[in-house]
Amino acid sequence: MNMVRALALLPFVAMLVGPFFLNRVTPTIFGMPLLLAWFVAWILITAAIMAVIFRFDPLNRDDIS
């Protein structure tokens, strides 16, 4: 597996493991409970990771026919 595509596993693991450690209400970030802020942050990070994967994936090059 290409190392750039392996980045796609990172959000999956973060969202799967996060609730086990961050399921609290008391620390709030921008008025959201910690777990909700964790999910919102990882949704934004996932979009950035997918942009990196799209940019560096050789199958997305225009010169390949």
Image (spheres, grey):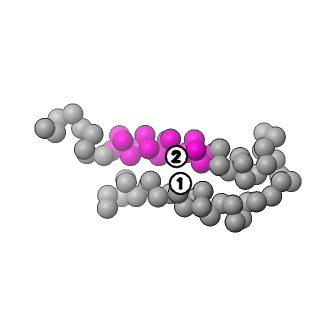
Q: What residue is drawn where x is 78% and y is 43%? A: 32
Q: Which mark is residue 32?
A: none
SS for callout 2: helix
Q: Main secondary structure of the magenta part?
A: helix
- Residue 36 in percent (x, y) is at 72, 48
Quadrant in the picture for residue 26: bottom right
Q: Is residue 53 magenta?
A: yes
- Residue 48 in percent (x, y) is at 49, 41
For label 2, the residue is: 46
SS for callout 1: helix
As drawn, is 11 to the left or to the right of 23?
Answer: left
Please identify the quadrant where the N terminus is shown. Answer: bottom left
Q: Amino acid at mark 2?
A: Thr
Q: What residue is drawn where x is 32% and y is 58%? A: 2
Magenta part of the chain: 41-56
As drawn, is 33 to the left or to the right of 64?
Answer: right
Q: How many marks?
A: 2
- Residue 5 in percent (x, y) is at 37, 54
Disc 2 + disc 1, Cβ < 8 Å:
yes
Q: What residue is drawn where x is 47% and y is 58%? A: 9
Q: Which mark is residue 11?
A: 1
Q: What residue is drawn where x is 65% and y is 60%? A: 18
- Residue 37 in percent (x, y) is at 71, 46
